[in-house]
Image (cartoon, rainbow, N blue to C red):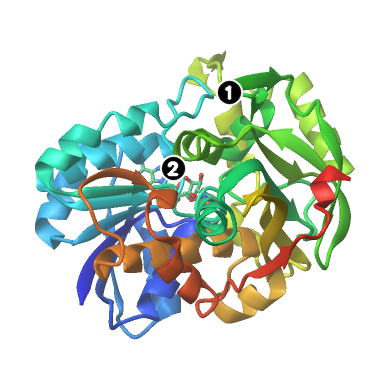
């Protein structure tokens, strides 16, 4: 029986709220707070049964968040607002000695650069306060890191090659939209790509390495090498990795539109003066693009995300592929969400459950792969994200 405070009422926040509400034996009291309270109220009404209280909070303002935490006294804060809010919410958790978790690592507003260093720097402070911060418990990062930990624990003596493969083969019918927060998504895609090889990071021009990869139940899709944050923690926690890469699919239309937006300067995060007011072009673009949660209605097709791993077991080379497919229309029928929000929100709820039931415990700052993957892997299917595995089959990323 525990009290949770969810911050952020977007596509992911709605899923976390629905899923926590469906597990009352753990999440006995739930508060959903966000910048725009009406969005929290709408989600609370959709969940029904007076399960969810709501509040307004500007999580950039540490004092406001401290006040809310002091009034509500949650056992855990689940941050599903934006990466910019990670540090202010961690500060509020420290001040009130409250456990913290999130699904995306901190990035400064004025630089499109995401790194764990800012959050890892809280290690000693969280330890001294006797509380836990769990970082990156969505799907990627999140489940992909737990898949890797599960593979390393059960299938290998040493893992050498890791390829995280992320496909959204869905169709939302919109001319152009992003599946999670547009500002964060576009910052991620337009920055330089990076992968780990032989003990160092290799940087590449944005979207300059790509190839077709086969995804189960979807088929072959052009996939682009991007930098993704779990590569940073996984290469640190699994030093035997000789190479670690992250691939994501994009359709030709998406890339064409993105190129045009970039060429005309609309993806820039450098402020400009517009009619006497300073605006950030990318924030303006976000304001005219569909909100991620609004894509759910009529979205068809599936996501397919997994880890393709190669290493050594009992002196023999071994390959292992573990993945989940999630159907947009099915999860819309279940809780009115699209699959990208769903695949992020379900692991966030389950990570929270792992903490609140004491299956994952400790003081300090942790990435998900540092905990035992077994209890999480045993339950994730039951909450809507079943997984599949293939052993010693040719890895499609290598073809
Ligand atoms: P949305 O844009 O749909 O929602 C973001 C929410 O955060 C909005 O409700 C917004 O409020 C709120 N918010 C923004 N700023 C503040 C603030 N200062 N104080 C309080 N609330 C604020 O994004 P998503 O739901 O798609 O994404 C949420 C998070 O999940 C992001 O950090 C994203 O990076 C992460 N994510 C992680 C994934 C993973 O697999 N690990 C995959 C997908 C997303 P308002 O409505 O007023 O704008």
Mark closer to the chain start, 1 or 2: 2
Image quarter of the N terminus:
bottom left
Image vertical order of residue 172 relative to residue 179, above or below: below
Residue 20's spot in the image, x, y percent?
37, 73
Q: Nearer the viewer, residue 43 or 279?
A: 43
Residue 63 seen in the current view: no
Q: Residue furthest front?
A: 315
The residue positioned 39% from the left and 49% from the top of the image is: 370
Q: Nearer the viewer, mark 1 or mark 2?
A: 1
Report whether residue 184 is seen: yes
| Quadrant assignment for the C terminus | top right
Mark 1 falls on what kind of element? Answer: loop
Q: Position of residue 68 (x, y in %)?
A: 17, 53
**Which residue is at a point 76% across and 46% down the rendered structure image?**
176
- Which percent across, then down, holds residue 327? 70, 71
- Would residue 397 appear left or right of 314 to someone viewing this image? right
Q: Ligand 1: does it lie within 8 Å of the C-beta at label 2?
A: yes
Q: Quadrant of residue 366?
A: top left
Looking at the image, residue 306 sits to the left or right of residue 381; the answer is: right
For residue 226, the mark is none
Left or right of 143, for residue 174: right
* Quarter residue 284 falls in: top right
For residue 199, the mark is: 1
Q: Nearer the viewer, residue 113 or 266?
A: 113
Residue nearest the observer in this picture, 7 or 324: 324
Q: Which label was assigned to residue 82? A: 2
In the image, residue 122 sits, relative to residue 329, either above or below, namely above
Q: Residues within 10 Å of mark 1 (few under 14, many from 20)?
A: few
Q: Distance of mark 1 from mark 2, alpha carbons?
A: 31 Å
Neighbour tally class for label 2: few under 14, some 14-19, many 20 plus, Cα within 10 Å: many
């Amino acid at each position: 029986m525990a009290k949770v405070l969810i911050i952020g009422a977007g596509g992911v926040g709605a899923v976390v709220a629905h899923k926590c509400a469906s597990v009352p034996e753990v999440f006995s009291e739930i508060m959903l707070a966000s910048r725009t309270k009406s969005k929290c109220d709408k989600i609370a009404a959709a969940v029904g049964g007076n399960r969810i209280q709501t509040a307004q909070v500007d999580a950039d303002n540490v004092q406001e968040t401290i006040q809310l935490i002091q009034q509500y006294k949650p056992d855990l804060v689940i941050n599903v607002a934006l990466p910019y809010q990670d540090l202010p919410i961690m500060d509020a958790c420290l001040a009130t000695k409250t456990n913290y978790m999130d699904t995306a690592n901190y990035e400064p507003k004025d630089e499109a650069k995401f790194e764990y260093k800012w959050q890892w720097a809280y290690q000693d402070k969280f330890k001294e306060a006797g509380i836990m911060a769990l970082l990156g418990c969505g799907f990627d990062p999140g489940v992909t890191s737990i898949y890797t930990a599960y593979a390393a624990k059960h299938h290998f003596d040493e893992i050498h090659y890791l390829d995280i493969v992320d496909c959204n083969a869905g169709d939302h019918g919109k001319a152009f939209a992003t599946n999670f927060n547009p500002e964060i998504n576009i910052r991620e895609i337009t920055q330089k790509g990076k992968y780990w090889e032989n003990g160092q990071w290799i940087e590449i021009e944005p979207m300059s390495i790509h190839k077709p990869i086969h995804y189960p139940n979807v088929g072959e899709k052009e996939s682009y090498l991007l930098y993704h944050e779990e590569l940073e923690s996984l290469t640190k926690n699994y030093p035997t990795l000789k190479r670690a890469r992250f691939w994501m699919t994009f359709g030709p239309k998406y890339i064409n539109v993105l190129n045009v937006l970039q060429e005309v300067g609309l993806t820039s995060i450098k402020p400009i003066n517009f009619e006497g007011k300073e605006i950030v072009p990318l924030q303006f673009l976000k304001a005219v693009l569909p909100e991620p949660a609004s894509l759910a209605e009529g979205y068809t097709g599936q996501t397919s995300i997994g880890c393709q791993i190669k290493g050594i077991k009992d002196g023999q080379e071994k390959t292992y592929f573990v993945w989940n497919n999630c159907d947009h229309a099915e999860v819309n029928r279940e809780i009115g969400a699209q699959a990208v929000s769903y695949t992020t929100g379900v692991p966030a709820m389950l990570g929270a459950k792992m903490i609140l039931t004491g299956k994952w415990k400790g003081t300090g700052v942790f990435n998900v792969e540092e905990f035992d993957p077994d209890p999480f892997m045993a339950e994730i299917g039951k909450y809507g994200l079943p997984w599949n595995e293939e052993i010693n089959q040719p890895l499609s990323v290598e073809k």
